[in-house]
Image (spheres, helix red, strand yellow):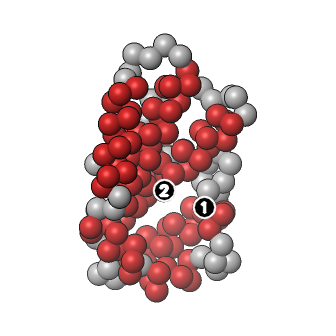
Amino acid sequence: MKKFLNFTTSLSKCIGEDEKCDTPRHYRFFLDSLTFIGGVVYQPVVFECLENIYPFIENCFPNKHLNFMLPEEKLSTAARKALTCAEKSLEQSTVCSQDTVDKLKCALVALQSLRNKYRHFKRGKMQVTVFKPKEMMPQGWKGVNCQL
């Protein structure tokens, strides 16, 4: 995974920020998003949390299918309820610290953004965007600091 993250980081830097064409700038957004998500999820403390999290949150996801977590544009009410439930369940356990839970939130929001931007890209409707993890959190999670 480390090699992949190094590759995406290097390729993103190689594309640069001053590119005039939209397609390389879109690719840069995708690469920066993937680098961020991988960098968050594969931190040892976060990965350990993910490995041990399920028994504490399984009741929060009654349909056992996570597609509802990544809706078309923004988090659905069902997804927000599930995440709030999971967060409260994790607060009562020692599996994940609050900092780790916040990192998981950041990775989820980045994944949702990546998915949405890719859908727009495939349709030829993606606006040029710079990946800014510090500015991506939804209204209710503004206290969460997203950075590697």
| Drawn side of residue 65 relative to residue 8, left or right | right
Of the pair 107 and 21, the residue shown nearer to us: 21
| Drawn side of residue 51 relative to residue 59, left or right | left
Please state the horizontal and vertical placement of residue 99, each as a whole percent of the image. Answer: 29, 62
Q: Residue at x 70, y 29 (%)?
A: 124
Q: Earlier in the sequence, mark 1 or mark 2?
A: 1
What's the amino acid at mark 2? Leu
Mark 1 to mark 2: distance in Å? 9 Å
Q: Are marks 1 and 2 in contact (CB under 8 Å)?
A: yes
Please state the horizontal and vertical placement of residue 113, each as a whole percent of the image. Answer: 54, 44
| Drawn side of residue 49 relative to residue 120, left or right | left
The quarter in which the N terminus is drawn is bottom left
What's the amino acid at mark 1? Met
Q: Residue at x 32, y 74 (%)?
A: 48
Q: Quadrant of residue 118?
A: top right
Mark 1 surroundings: few (<14), some (14-19) or many (≥20) residues within 10 A: many
Location of mark 2 (residue): 108
For the question of whether residue 135 can be seen, the reply is: no
Indicate whether 13 appears above or below 139: above
Q: Which mark is residue 69?
A: 1
Please state the horizontal and vertical placement of residue 78, each as a whole percent of the image. Answer: 64, 65
Mark 2 surroundings: few (<14), some (14-19) or many (≥20) residues within 10 A: some
Q: Which mark is residue 36?
A: none
Q: Residue at x 36, y 65 (%)?
A: 101
| Drawn side of residue 62 relative to residue 103, left or right | right
Please state the horizontal and vertical placement of residue 6, each as a whole percent of the image. Answer: 31, 46
Of the pair 83 and 129, the residue shown nearer to us: 129
Dot 2 falls on a residue whose secondary structure is: helix
Dot 1 falls on a residue whose secondary structure is: helix
For the question of whether residue 87 can be seen, the reply is: yes
What residue occupies the far right of the structure in this picture?
123
